[in-house]
Image (spheres, helix red, strand yellow):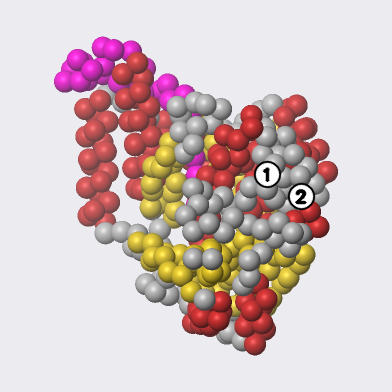
């Protein structure tokens, strides 16, 4: 571990942006650890954020103590570390047999960051996955940043949305394979801000071997995105014109993304993901009209007689049923709040992770019965139920 000790010795300074330890071998000890520099009482220390279960713990350590803790973590607990500073990036991989591989590189934008320091305040309002002030090629090309890395005021909501999206991906990073190419399909990719962000984060930041395919109906959008991917030399990112329902993919797919696919297009995307056995599904549904036209319930009529109330209830019921149907298919499913896309109230994300636990047959049957009773009560028959 001498190489690791030397790496941490060099990186633990005021130029450090963040160290992230992941791919844990002992989740009961720590699922993830992050380290960043902070100033307390005019002294530089390093704040450790440890994630264990649903709890988060914060502690500050001097450089030598933090160095020892990081070496200990990588020896006994974690198999991957990502280190980012103002001038350098490094990735550490530890095999199951204890072999350590360290890859270091100077940041492409390092020259412009010399003499600049990251925010060392102890309580920062927000720490973004893609830090403010550091230019990122795709953000510059898409008009979110200036070439110097300043976020353009009119695009700040988009910048926040991109970082929020990357937080969701970071949370499931350990679920994705680390020993082979990760294959991702992004349905309804549109202008592809988030598709480019996903590729950049997984490939450039996390150093994963990935292949991302974006699908959209608009030929001009596909041409533009393909040209940008080629310009940026994003060799693992491709785009294809087509619709979700008829799309076929013969190979293995690890993750399916569907952001604002309209109405039943979300159901077709979820059906594809389940059919392929994708490990991760991330969907932000939009325009859930189907159940709004079906729902009939005498008991709820005092609520449903108001069109806007009925529309919102139908949208929530649609997504709740989708989440439950995914759970029936063996996914641990959450519905999370996502930042508005183009200032729309459609900001709920369905995030589903394929479970490895064996589910009792009786429990699964009871869940199916309760969902069927609910659909009978509301007199609805959602598309996803028919598809899967």
Using the image as rendered, state which of residue 309 and residue 387 is in the foreground: 309
Tag 2 and tag 1, C-beta contact below 8 Å: yes
Is 140 a magenta residue? no
Res. 345 in view: yes
For label 1, the crowd category at 10 Å Cα-Cα, with few meaning under 14, some 14 to 19 and many 20 or more, is many
What is the secondary structure assignment of the residue under circle 1?
helix
The C terminus, quarter of image = top left
Q: Residue at x 54, y 36 (%)?
A: 259
In x, y percent, where is residue 319? 38, 34
Q: Residue at x 52, y 26 (%)?
A: 343
Q: Which mark is residue 196?
A: 1
Using the image as rendered, state which of residue 377 and residue 13 is in the foreground: 13
Res. 177 in view: no
In x, y percent, where is residue 382? 37, 30
Q: Which mark is residue 334?
A: none
The N terminus, quarter of image = bottom right
What is the secondary structure assignment of the residue under circle 2?
loop
Is 299 a magenta residue? yes
Q: Residue at x 39, y 74 (%)?
A: 29
Residue occupying the far right of the picture: 231
Q: Quadrant of residue 187?
A: top right
Please say if 313 is above or below 99: above
Q: Residue at x 38, y 48 (%)?
A: 333
In x, y percent, where is residue 25? 47, 75
Between the C-alphas of marks 2 and 1, the distance is 9 Å
Residue occupying the far front of the picture: 42
In x, y percent, where is residue 90? 68, 68
- Span shown in magenta: 280-307
Label 2 sits on residue? 234
Please say if 222 is above or below 54: above
Using the image as rendered, state which of residue 141 and residue 254 is in the foreground: 141
For label 2, the crowd category at 10 Å Cα-Cα, with few meaning under 14, some 14 to 19 and many 20 or more, is some
């Amino acid at each position: 571990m001498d190489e690791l000790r030397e790496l941490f010795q060099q990186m633990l300074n005021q130029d450090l942006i963040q160290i992230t330890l992941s791919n844990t071998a002992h989740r009961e000890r720590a699922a993830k650890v992050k380290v960043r520099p902070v100033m307390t009482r005019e002294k530089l220390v390093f704040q450790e954020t440890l994630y264990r279960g649903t709890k988060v713990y914060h502690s500050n350590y001097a450089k030598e103590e933090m160095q020892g803790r990081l070496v200990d973590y990588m020896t006994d607990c974690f198999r991957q570390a990502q280190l980012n500073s103002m001038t350098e990036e490094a990735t550490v991989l530890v095999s199951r047999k204890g072999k350590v591989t360290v890859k270091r590189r100077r940041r492409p934008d390092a020259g412009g960051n010399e003499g600049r320091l990251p925010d060392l305040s102890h309580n920062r309002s927000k720490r973004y996955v893609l830090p403010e002030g550091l230019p990122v090629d795709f953000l510059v090309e898409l008009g979110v940043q200036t070439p110097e890395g300043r976020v353009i005021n009119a695009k700040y909501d988009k910048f926040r949305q991109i970082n929020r999206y990357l937080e969701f991906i970071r949370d499931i990073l350990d679920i994705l394979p680390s020993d082979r190419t990760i294959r991702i399909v992004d349905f309804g990719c549109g202008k592809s801000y988030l598709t480019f962000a996903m590729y950049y984060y997984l490939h450039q930041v996390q150093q994963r071997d990935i292949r991302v395919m974006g699908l959209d109906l608009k030929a001009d959008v596909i041409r533009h995105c393909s040209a940008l991917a080629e310009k940026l030399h994003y060799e693992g990112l491709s785009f294809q014109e087509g619709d979700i329902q008829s799309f076929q993919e013969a190979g293995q797919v690890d993750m399916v993304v569907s952001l604002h696919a309209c109405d039943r297009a979300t159901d077709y995307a979820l059906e594809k993901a389940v059919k392929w056995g994708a490990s991760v599904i991330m969907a932000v549904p939009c325009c859930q009209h189907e159940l709004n036209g079906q729902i009939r319930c005498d008991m709820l009529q005092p609520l449903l007689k108001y069109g806007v109330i009925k529309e919102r209830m139908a949208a929530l019921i649609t997504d709740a049923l989708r989440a439950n149907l995914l759970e029936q298919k063996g996914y641990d499913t959450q519905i999370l709040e996502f930042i508005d896309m183009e200032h729309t109230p459609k900001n709920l994300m369905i995030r589903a992770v394929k479970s490895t636990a064996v589910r009792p047959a009786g429990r699964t049957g009871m869940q199916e019965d309760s969902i069927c009773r609910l659909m009978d009560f509301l007199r609805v028959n959602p598309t996803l139920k028919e598809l899967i």
